Amino acid sequence: MDKKEKRQQHEAKRQKREMRETWDSFEYLLREKLAGADNILARIDYEASAVGVSVTVRREFVCKKLIELINEIVDEREGKRDAM
């Protein structure tokens, strides 16, 4: 392994360590928000089940819509950042 490869490996490890530390410092906040979102999702699931929507349809629909919503939020955030 040459010096360039060693440097690249070291840098990859450093970035992973930095990412883990950054994640760890925010995880509790994200967990709180996701727990709140889970309460809303449970209500959606309950309402849909009450009108006869199957578990499979509910799960597929919610997963699709959550991904769409996350992408919209990211697009809005990045659009605001680009506008600055």
Image (tube, rainbow, N blue to C red):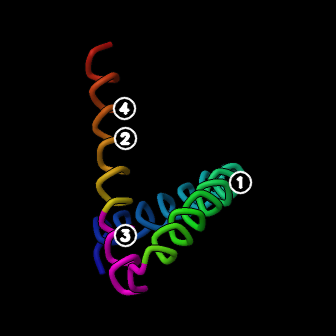
Q: Is residue 9 magenta?
A: no
Q: Nearer the viewer, mark 4 or mark 3?
A: 3
| Residues shaded magenta | 52-64
Toward which corner of the image does residue 18 lie, by quadrant? bottom right
**Circle 1 crowding by C-alpha within 10 Å: few under 14, some 14–19, many from 20:** few
Q: Quadrant of the N terminus?
A: bottom left
Choose top left, top right, bottom left or bottom right for residue 72: top left
Q: Earlier in the sequence, mark 1 or mark 3?
A: 1
Q: Earlier in the sequence, mark 4 or mark 3?
A: 3
| Dot in front, 2 or 3 | 3
Q: CA distance from mark 2 to mark 3?
A: 15 Å
The amino acid pointed to by label 3 is Cys
Which comes sooner in the sequence, label 4 or label 1?
1
Please name the residue that numbered disc 2 is placed on: 73
Determine which residue is flagged by label 4: 77
Q: Badge 1 is on which residue? A: 32
Q: CA distance from mark 2 to mark 1?
A: 18 Å
Q: Which mark is residue 63?
A: 3
